[in-house]
Amino acid sequence: MAKGEGGEQYSNASLLEKPVSSDGLALARKHEHRNRLSVCNKICYAIGGAPYQITGCALGFFLQIYLLDVAQLDPFYASIILFGGRAWDAITDPTVGFLVSRSPWTRYGRMLPWIVLSTPLAVLSYFLIWYVPPFENGKVIWYLLFYCIFQTLQTCFHVPYSALTMFISSEQKDRDSATAYRMTVEVMGTVLGTAIQGQIVGMANAPCLPGPRESVTNLSNSSVFFGHNNSEPVISLDHTKTAYMIASGVICIIYVLCAIVVFFGVREQKESCRPRSEPMGFFQGIKLVMGHGPYAKLVMVFLFTSLGFMLLEGNFALFCSSTLGFRNDFQNILLVIMLSATLAIPFWQWFLTRFGKKTAVCAGSLSVVPFMILVVCMKSNLIVTYVVSFAAGVGVAAAFLLPWSMLPDVVDDFQVQNPDSTGHEALFYSFYVFFTKFASGVSLGISTLSLDFAGYISRGCSQPEEVDITLKVLVSAAPIALIMIGLTILYWYPITEERRQGNRKLLQEQRDNEADSETDSTELANMV
């Protein structure tokens, strides 16, 4: 510290500022303006979130019913594929996050090369998931193999893309705005995935087979299931298989286009002048991120709430087609849910800025509970189902937006408490994705196995009463219980709005000091 003429004290930093004044301030402002994100940058970044949601939505809503009714696998083997693929996917997330965190900086950045190089093989493996091989004995291995390969390659796309949030701008306001753009595009991606997969497949629905509640005579009188000559079905199972392949081909093209837009439309900013921490071991990285209390609590919150929503997502198509009897309309019901979620995203963005993120999570999660109860208690009525589905989509939107909006806050909190430990953003994002995907694998595996125990009939026009009861539990009672557990843990989540704003100010001051230091160094070099 030094003393001025009046005896007041000021820091050495302020001494440096005095001769810098105009030129230094101009350079700092120029540096700040250069790092601000344009609307075009935000849109290009947001488009990169579409492939994960489009493919995830198609797999989440339709893979179970595809394996059971089109590939005609036994429910037990289908559960192995669904759980095995998701469990493998969950394992690859922290592994890829670990590898990404150790990746060197290239001329294109540290995250973008992962996104581009993983895309070609990812779309090929995705397409082969929806292809029914011409042999029976190796079908389970076929689907499990390509499902695992696709999940691995998609992880190589999504983990770096998620961590890219921290590198597109140093301004938290820009990152929050870009996240809102991304969430809007991702929910639109779910609409697109549902529309492409649902509408194309819906036009080639193979006829169902008589279940325990119908007779062949009753079914033959209905033109819904049979052709006009009442002997041959209008659409064969081969037509349905072709429809699934066409839908997957369209999704593959969109996947590639989105990767190209991200690569050419997003500029990854190099990390600040602070040196990165030394690379650490895999298990040391697990201990680091899970040892941060707010992060561990947030992960547990969304582990349970995600498990609840994924149970609903994975079984709702079967519930609509089998229990409610809307075999030819379930894809439209799913589309209504996703459209409603898309329209509700701006509302939840306003809500979280007005009332805080914790309050928004509680309100969003609880808003869907009444409709989960109503959909299983009411009698089968198509119009009422559409209304309930539209209302439920409002709550689904909160499940999309809020987790990714809160995750940067936890990373910032870690950086404030550990200023010398940097470069671990990919680990935080990858472990979060790990737990959500693990929840998805558990939900799909348990639900499909439950249907096997209940006596599910492939392509059945109706199902045994035990299957109907099981589906009602899977889309209502179980998700509600899991959501309540998650919200109970949320009560103890420590990052309030005051703490979040305090972290933001501390980090901004830190970045300003670094920018001032960088400006001073530049000016001294020019003087020399």
Image (spheres, rainbow, N blue to C red):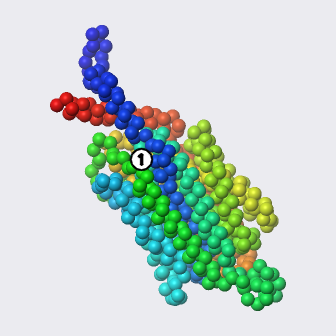
**Residue 284 visible, this angle:** no
- Looking at the rendered image, the quarter that the C terminus falls into is top left
- Looking at the rendered image, the quarter that the N terminus falls into is top left
Determine whether the residue tagged by mark 1 lies in a helix, strand or loop: loop
Graded by Cα atoms within 10 Å as few (under 14), some (14 to 19) or many (20 or more), the crowding at tag 1 reads: many
Lateral position of residue 215 relative to residue 197, left or right: right
Q: Where is residue 219 in the image (x, y as percent from the top left)?
A: 79, 83
Closer-to-camera residue (471/223): 223
Q: Please tell me how many numbered marks the rendered image carries.
A: 1
At a point 26% along the width and 15% down the height, the residue shown is 3
At a point 79% along the width and 62% down the height, the residue shown is 383
Q: Position of residue 424 (x, y in %)?
A: 36, 50
Closer-to-camera residue (417/437): 437
Residue 109 versus residue 239 in the image, above or below: above
Closer-to-camera residue (122/63): 122
Q: Which residue lies furthest to the top in this view?
A: 6
Residue carrying label 1 = 168
Q: Where is residue 162 in the image (x, y as percent from the top left)?
A: 45, 54
